[in-house]
Image: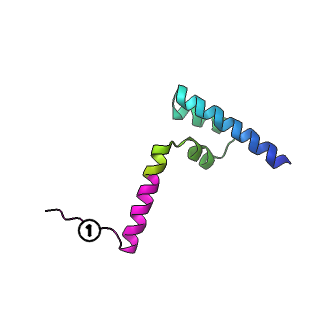
Amino acid sequence: MNDRRQDRTTAALILEALHMKRAFDEDAALKLLHRKKVPEDLARSALVGPFERRQVFRRQTIRLLGELGRLPRRDLN
């Protein structure tokens, strides 16, 4: 039962931080979450917007394909 209450509290804090990010900037939102003892990895992943998520996914996919040798070949001429 304590975990559920903590999850609701954390969710409320993240929602507040998202509003703060919109009003001020991401640094202010991260400071709020840090002050409230939200784990840093959770805080950063929660504040990343859809554009940044797509960029991270694209980079991870390209990196994986490169490691597997399956990147499409480009004609540079």
Residue 47 is situated, as x and y percent measured from the top left of the image, at: 56, 41
Residue 36: tell me if it is visible. no
Direction from residue 41 to residue 72 in the image, left or right: left
Residue under pointer 1: 73
Q: Residue furthest right?
A: 1
Direction from residue 43 to residue 6 in the image, left or right: right
Q: Residue at x 65, y 32 (%)?
A: 16
Residue 19 is situated, as x and y percent measured from the top left of the image, at: 59, 30
Residue 17 inside the magenta-drawn segment: no
Q: Residue at x 58, y 29 (%)?
A: 20
Q: Residue furthest bottom?
A: 69
Q: Which range of residues does the magenta coloring cover?
A: 56-77
Q: Amino acid at mark 1?
A: Arg
Q: Is residue 49 above or below residue 65?
A: above
Given residues 31 and 53, the one toward you in this image is 53
Quadrant for the C terminus, please.
Answer: bottom left
Residue 64 inside the magenta-drawn segment: yes
Residue 57 is situated, as x and y percent measured from the top left of the image, at: 46, 56
Q: Residue at x 61, y 43 (%)?
A: 43
Q: Residue at x 62, y 47 (%)?
A: 42
Given residues 6 and 57, the one toward you in this image is 57
Q: Is residue 52 above or below residue 27?
A: below
Determine whether the residue tagged by mark 1 lies in a helix, strand or loop. Answer: loop
Residue 10: tell me if it is visible. yes
Given residues 55 and 24, the one toward you in this image is 55
> How many residues crowd mark 1 within 10 Å: few (<14), some (14–19), many (20+)?
few
- How many marks the image carries: the answer is 1
